[in-house]
Amino acid sequence: MQKKPAPQALIFDVFGTCVDWRRSIAQTVTEVLPEVDAFAFADAWRGEYDPAMARIRAGNRGYVALDVLHLENLLRVAEQFGVTLEDAESLNSAWERLMPWPDVLPGLEKMAETALIAPCSNGSIALMARMARHVGLPWHAILGAELAQNYKPHPSVYLASCAALQLDPSEVVMVAAHNGDLHAARGAGLATAFVPRPVEHGPKQTTDLHAEGDWDYLAPDFVALAEML
Amino acid sequence: MQKKPAPQALIFDVFGTCVDWRRSIAQTVTEVLPEVDAFAFADAWRGEYDPAMARIRAGNRGYVALDVLHLENLLRVAEQFGVTLEDAESLNSAWERLMPWPDVLPGLEKMAETALIAPCSNGSIALMARMARHVGLPWHAILGAELAQNYKPHPSVYLASCAALQLDPSEVVMVAAHNGDLHAARGAGLATAFVPRPVEHGPKQTTDLHAEGDWDYLAPDFVALAEML
């Protein structure tokens, strides 16, 4: 792996790869809705994520920011759980304050010394910028879904992110804890790095425990990936 | 001024307001083209900036990134100065390494504690991201011309920047050393802050020495502006 040319930029999946959305959301749910099972609520909320984006990727709905989808999904899940939300928008903003895994900030700081770093997330610019401010993610730019007006894994999201940096996809590494994200990024011509997050979905996680492709980089965490580059 | 509500975001003009483009460009020109008057060359290069953008604002040319305009302008100016460029693209990249005025980094760090901060520049996302990395500008996102696919002072650039943060223009302050920029931002509904840069164009500068409107904030530098907010 040492012989690859140093990448010009690293772009990152955020939910799960950079931040522990499940424990962060459950923490807020515990505070706001003490009567519900917070992890079950967090999982149900996140469970609505893919179907909501799928309609947009399929062209059955125009692009709307993830914040809007999160809010629609929250209202649906609250109804399923039989709870009344006094301030749904405030609870929805919990996605702006997700805590990074412990290796993320030191790893990103080190990677930023030699390459451009930016999220390539399905989160909106507003959501990613507020998260960056809240938890100190040192991005050089916010890329991803909003630039492409579409959602990963649609190839346009990866390609628009590379184009915004005026780089060829081969000069850019997509970093993710999800094999499907890397599969799509490779299809768009990007290099790929897998960093497993084996408890993203809790202690009983069964998916994305291991690399399911011959990704260009495999690292146990962001600090190790920074040293590999 | 103390009674205004705290702004949710501050967006910034960059060339001149945040960075000393003239001395930075002249420094690089001195190194690459020792035979020319470096400040005259920098001024001539920058002099091509407005006419190049004006064609795009007027709809006579589709949006192209400022990097492309800078390169076209460089070739024209080199011809005027009768010099041959061995590596025009390398010289063009000097715009990615412009040095901030001394108050900018401490001022931005302080403003970032209470608000979102982002450039609202005519520079591309790629240019702004590389500059952020080179000189340590702590932006939370890169906004501006590329999002709107148009150039300031077209109102769409200010409005697209606010929209990307999911904020009403009235919740956003445009910070600039140029009265014209603030006039356009106010026209789009933003709050305004004037920070003079009286030697942006050198010791004989005659324009933008003073506020030419009743801007919402007037500050001698970014640190003072941060304290005012």
Image (cartoon, coloured by chain):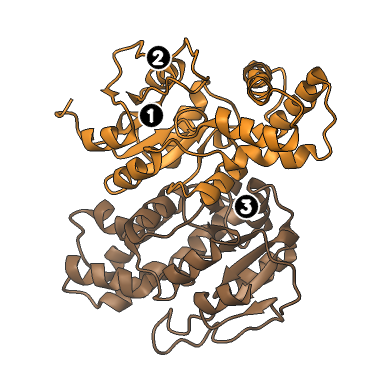
Chain colours: A orange, B brown
Residue at the spot 54% in from the left edge and 86% down from the top edge:
B209
**Label 3 to label 1: alpha-carbon separation:** 27 Å
- Does residue B67 appear left or right of residue A160 in this picture? left
Q: Work out whether residue A86 can be spotted.
A: yes
Residue A176 falls in image quadrant: top left
- Does residue B35 appear left or right of residue B228 in this picture? left
Image spot of residue B145 (x, y percent): 55, 53
**Label 2 to label 1: alpha-carbon separation:** 15 Å
Looking at the rendered structure, the secondary structure element under dot 1 is strand
- Does residue A165 appear left or right of residue B159 in this picture? left
Residue B29 disc label: none
Residue at the spot 46% in from the left edge and 21% down from the top edge:
A199
Say if labels 3 and 2 share a chain: no
Q: Foreground: A76 or A181? A: A76
Mark 2 highlights which residue?
A209
Q: Foreground: A65 or B88? A: A65
Q: Which of marks 3 and 1 is in front?
A: 1
Q: In which quarter of the image is the N terminus of chain A?
A: top left
Q: Quadrant of the C terminus of chain A?
A: top left
Mark 1 highlights which residue?
A175
Residue B113 falls in image quadrant: bottom right
Image spot of residue B119 (x, y percent): 52, 58
What type is the residue that disc 3 sits on?
Answer: Ser
Q: Work out whether residue A122 can be spotted.
A: no
Residue B161 disc label: 3
What type is the residue that disc 2 sits on?
Answer: Leu
Give the farthest residue toward the left: A3
